[in-house]
Image: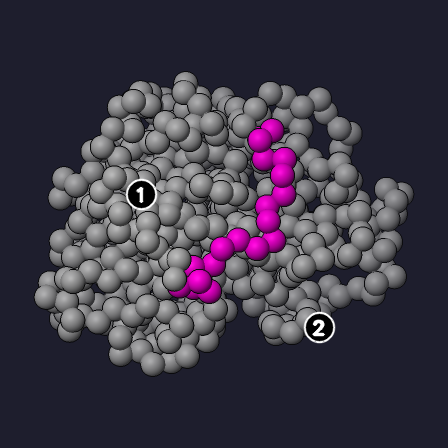
Amino acid sequence: MRSALSLSITSALLFTAPFASAVPTRSPRDVVELASPVSPASPEETTTGGHKIALHRRGSAEIQKEDGTVDFNKAHAHLARARAKYVRGLKNFELNTGEAHFLAPSMVDPSLLPGAKDGNNLARRGAWGAGDDASLDWEGDRVSAEKRDKIFGAAGSGRLHGVPPQKPAPVANRRALAKRAVKNPKYVWNPKAHPSTTSSAAPAVKTAGVGLDSHNGGTLYTGSLSIGTPAKSFVIDFDTGSADLWVPSSTCNSAACNTHSKYDPSASTTAAEVAGKSLSLTYGDGSSTRGNVYTDTVTIAGLTATGQTLGAATYLTSDFQDDPYDGLMGMAYASMSTLGANPLFQTLAAQGKVARNQFSFLLADSGSELFLGGMNAAHYQAGSTVVYPVTSKSYWLLGTQANVAGSPVSSTGTFNSIIDTGTSVIVAPTQSAAAFWDSVPNSGVYGSGYYTYECANPPDVSFSFGPQFGEQWALSSESLNLGRVSAGSDRCVGAIVGADIGINAWILGASFLENVYSTYDFDTNSVSFSDLA
């Protein structure tokens, strides 16, 4: 991979191009030839030899206030972290492969980049404060309460968009969505607040289970793994949008570190420091982590990887203090690694520890699960699986179309989307998001990349994937709803958000993934979706 260097990755502000009408041309190194959808193995075969990790989950409710309205400060913090992650990932790809990724801003006509004109840019937010009075609208976007009432008033106000409703077309996961009619709870068990219950389940892994926990309704899914000899357990955020494993170091004494479990390499007989490398990650909201790099034994769901490369953070900013996880496990391709090393799952596969070189996610209100080595037939409908080839061995990247009321949104065309368990909402380039919401009947512009719709009449939204775009995978009305504009309002804020986060692609996060069973396969370089059982 990369020569032994100190890896200091900062999140300098990079921008994405507006939406494209087709998937961009790719350079030879990272391109994957598109083929017909791959036929998956039978559920019985894919279940055999797999290992379950139960997940705790937090979701869209985590960015809602108690009255059901949107907490825009938290929402923007999520977008800022996503921006920094993807800026960093594109830099990593170029360092690891010697070529720019085809999504990188350097591959885009500069005249099309936000910043060349007045555009929706996260750097221009009016405030990032944590207080109740802090605003995340831009200075130029702010409107009075009286004007907002007009914006979200009758259709004749001139500020609402849309086309006449169309008859909904059948979608692949329609029957499964009927089971998601109950709202997510406002509070779901937090392992950091209840350490005595954190994971008795984690080490009982040989018989298949460590849990993914759901925090406050859906932006984050965490589970457990252990590091070192003797093993020490950590609560981990499993992220398909990045490719590194890191946890806090025992030498970190900041307030943020003291709320988390720490890794002490001196207490592990299998730890070895990697000379010449250091961990340094700066996030888009100003938070950062830095530290040292080691190899050690890592065990997850009864599967043990030896010599796994990981970062040990010797400093965490206050932004991490209240996070319910100790560290992060990236599950994208190794080409995206900050440490220039194989991610944990790929190490397990290379060492022959998993039955199949694939893993699957169930992100649900309860019983969420990461399944290593295949698919768990208990969580999806037999015969419903469709497999789509990735367009690049970097992110889990698919050619995609958006649909409203069963029809493709022609103004957004075909675009790239990244399937990302580490992002809470669906993020689109600002111009693409505007074009999408312009096709939604009675949608409204809230400002700063957010859009609204009538809570009582949510749009029928789905996504289709290449190369054939033959199926439509729908969002439930619950998944689409980030919360009401204000207490008692009849307008809801949509989970498809416009933000130029440094990458020319859509990000399909938990708002999409909680509606499907998703599987990621390194052997066939594909992502598959299945109806929920």
Say whether residue 429 is visible: no
Residue type at numbered disc 1: Gly
Specify the amino acid type for callout 2.
Asp
Residue 131: horizontal and vertical position, in percent?
Answer: 65, 74
Looking at the picture, tell me which residue is in the foreground, 437 or 383: 383
Tell me the residue that label 2 is attached to.
133
The dot on residue 378 is: none
Q: Judge by depth and name the residue closer to the eye, 432 or 246.
A: 246
Residue at the spot 43% in from the left edge and 51% down from the top edge:
213
Which residue does the image show at 78% across and 29% down from the upper left?
164
Task: Look at the picture and state if 132 lies above or below 210.
Answer: below
Residue found farthest to the top:
383
* Above or below, comparing residue 167 to residue 153 in the picture: above
Left/right of residue 359 with respect to residue 187 in the rendered view? left
Query: Could you tell me residue 6's position as x and y percent?
Result: 23, 71
Which secondary structure type mostly characterizes the magenta part of the structure?
loop
192 vs 442: above or below: below
In magenta segment, residue 184: yes
Q: In this view of the protein, can residue 135 be seen by the observer?
A: yes
Q: What is the x, y in percent for residue 311?
A: 26, 65
Question: Is 479 included in the stretch rendered in magenta?
Answer: no
- Residue designated by label 1: 209
Residue at point 88%, 44% (across, down): 154
